[in-house]
């Protein structure tokens, strides 16, 4: 019997549910210091829409477009925290899921104040 080593074998496809991708994104976001919570996206200045736990995804030819909606702790440097969220999410999506990311937009929806009493 002779085996053809050049033959390509189709093993089927791999499907990752959007909920799994969102879980990875949420965990990567919440691991960043000074991120208090994920929040639903604002639809206007005074109301909140029904969100999917602070994450929305779109697939494009260039990769995933990710929108993340967060509440930060008081006295946070918003730009530094947002950049850290982008880096953390980009690394997690690449390393854990293996997908390309086109963009990660961080929306700071709220600031939380803790009582020091």
Image (cartoon, grey):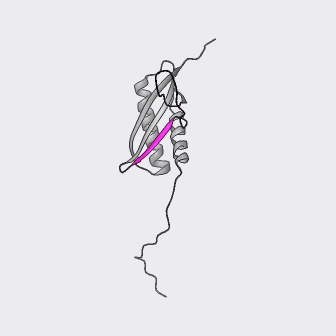
Looking at the rendering, in which quadrant would you find the C terminus? Answer: top right
Seen at 42% across and 76% down, the residue is 7
How many numbered dots are placed on residues in this image?
A: 0
Q: Mainly helix, strand or loop, the magenta region?
A: loop
Identify the residue at the far left of this view.
62
Identify the residue at the far top of this view.
117
Residue 88 rendering spot, x and y as whole percentages: 46, 38
Seen at 51% across and 46% down, the residue is 21
Seen at 46% across and 40% down, the residue is 89
| Closest to the observer, 6 or 113 | 113
Task: Give the left or right position of residue 37, taking residue 93 as reference.
Answer: right
| Closest to the observer, 1 or 20 | 20
| Closest to the observer, 16 or 58 | 58
Task: Give the left or right position of residue 7, taking residue 113 as reference.
Answer: left
Residue 69 rendering spot, x and y as whole percentages: 48, 31
Compared to residue 106, the image places residue 1 above or below, namely below
Seen at 50% across and 35% down, the residue is 29
Residue 107 position by quadrant: top left
Q: Is residue 46 magenta?
A: yes
Identify the residue at the far bottom of this view.
1
Range covered by the magenta-colored residues: 39-61
Q: Is residue 80 magenta?
A: no
Compared to residue 94, the image places residue 71 above or below, namely above
Residue 15 rendering spot, x and y as whole percentages: 51, 56
């Amino acid at each position: 019997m002779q085996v053809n080593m050049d033959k390509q074998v189709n093993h089927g496809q791999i499907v990752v549910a959007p909920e799994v991708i969102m879980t990875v994104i949420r965990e990567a976001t919440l691991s960043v210091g000074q991120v208090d919570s994920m929040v639903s996206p604002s639809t206007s200045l005074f109301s909140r829409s029904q969100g999917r736990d602070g994450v929305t995804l779109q697939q494009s030819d260039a990769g995933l477009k990710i929108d993340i909606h967060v509440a930060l702790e008081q006295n946070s440097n918003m730009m530094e925290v947002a950049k850290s969220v982008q880096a953390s999410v980009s690394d997690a999506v690449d390393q854990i899921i293996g997908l390309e990311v086109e963009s990660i937009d961080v929306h700071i929806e709220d600031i939380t104040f803790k009582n020091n009493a």
